[in-house]
Image (cartoon, helix red, strand yellow):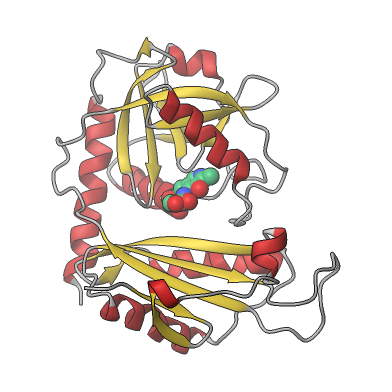
Amino acid sequence: MSRIAYVNGQYVPHAEAHIHIEDRGYQFADGVYEVAAVWRGRIIDEDGHLTRLKRSLDELHMTMPMADRPFAMVCRETLRQNRVRDGIIYIQISRGVSRRDHPFPENVERALVMTARAVDWPTDADDDSGAHVVSVADIRWLRRDVKSISLLPNVLAKQEARDKGAYEAWLVDEDGFVTEGSSTNAWIVDGDGKIVTRQLDNNILGGITRSTVIALARENGLEVVERPFSLAEALGAPEALLTSTTSFVRGIIDIDGNQIGDGTPGPVSRRLRGLYLDYCRGAGSNQ
Ligand code: PDD
């Protein structure tokens, strides 16, 4: 079955999907995006993704290209046309098409693209083999809270991880603190057994999975502390883990070749993964 993309009002086969060469997303990375998981036909944390999308747009002085209802309908139609019941939906909004010039153009329409593809999600908390992680200097701009399509430092960091046989790169700031992963949020369990993840500010993307996992942990009596942690602390931590829309919750088994815990995903990581999978199942059965 050929994949279908939504591009500026039309559903077109991928091979025929085009954007203009003077799209500002293409020329300036002047745009934002979202990736949401689809579980049994339902978009997990749809409201959270929409809220973050609007916030990213607002921070870049842009507005949504359409109202919420038609937007939700385009999401559903993109999923339907691609027959995706389990998978991801990708949404990108750029400032639009205009003669190349740095200032914002006036009276241009936002360019909106959506794609969807199937993914076989995990169903078992224990099927996580654990992730290898390497540390990389965080060389990004200072507005990492905006989900901007300008991802070059993230791409370079992820490639460095892949070149070293790792799943993820943890980005480390000038003071030795871990900000987040190249496309995931970063967590440890500290020496007191508390779950630690960096607080929300301009240094990290506010992960939707991150906030859901914090809520699930707290609802289930686990203590979560939002504070920075250093790479040195992570290397000595009993557990380390990562979260994202596409990774869900994964345990980390080593960082820069240093084994974490006993070298398998730890009990807290497995527990959180189980809670998150239950959450997805619940959301998936509501429709
Ligand atoms: N990445 N940090 C960064 C830098 C990210 O790019 C992402 C998401 C996250 C986790 O956010 P969430 O839980 O909302 O997925 C954290 C997406 C999946 C991507 O770029 O493909």
Q: Extreme front residue here? A: 15
Relative image position of residue 8 (x, y in whole percent): 53, 83
Task: Please give the count of numbered marks on the rendered protein.
Answer: 0
Relative image position of residue 257 (x, y in whole percent): 39, 12
In the picture, measured across the screen, residue 78 lies left or right of residue 161, that is: left
Relative image position of residue 230 (x, y in whole percent): 56, 20
Q: Residue at the spot x=80%, y=75% of the render?
A: 99
Q: Nearer the viewer, residue 187 or 148?
A: 148
> Is residue 226 among what the camera can see?
no
Using the rendered view, name the quadrant where residue 128 is placed.
top left
Name the quarter where the C terminus is drawn: bottom left
In the picture, measured across the screen, residue 169 lies left or right of residue 271, that is: right
Q: Nearer the viewer, residue 251 or 150?
A: 150
Above or below, comparing residue 81 to residue 160 in the picture? below
Q: Residue at the spot x=42%, y=36% of the render?
A: 224
Q: Residue at the spot x=44%, y=79% of the render?
A: 6
In the picture, measured across the screen, residue 139 lies left or right of residue 128, that is: right
Using the rendered view, name the quadrant where residue 163 is placed.
top left
Above or below, comparing residue 158 to residue 71 in the picture? above
Above or below, comparing residue 34 to residue 140 in the picture? below
Q: Residue at the spot x=21%, y=73% of the render?
A: 1
Relative image position of residue 29 (x, y in whole percent): 67, 59
> Is residue 94 among what the camera can see?
yes
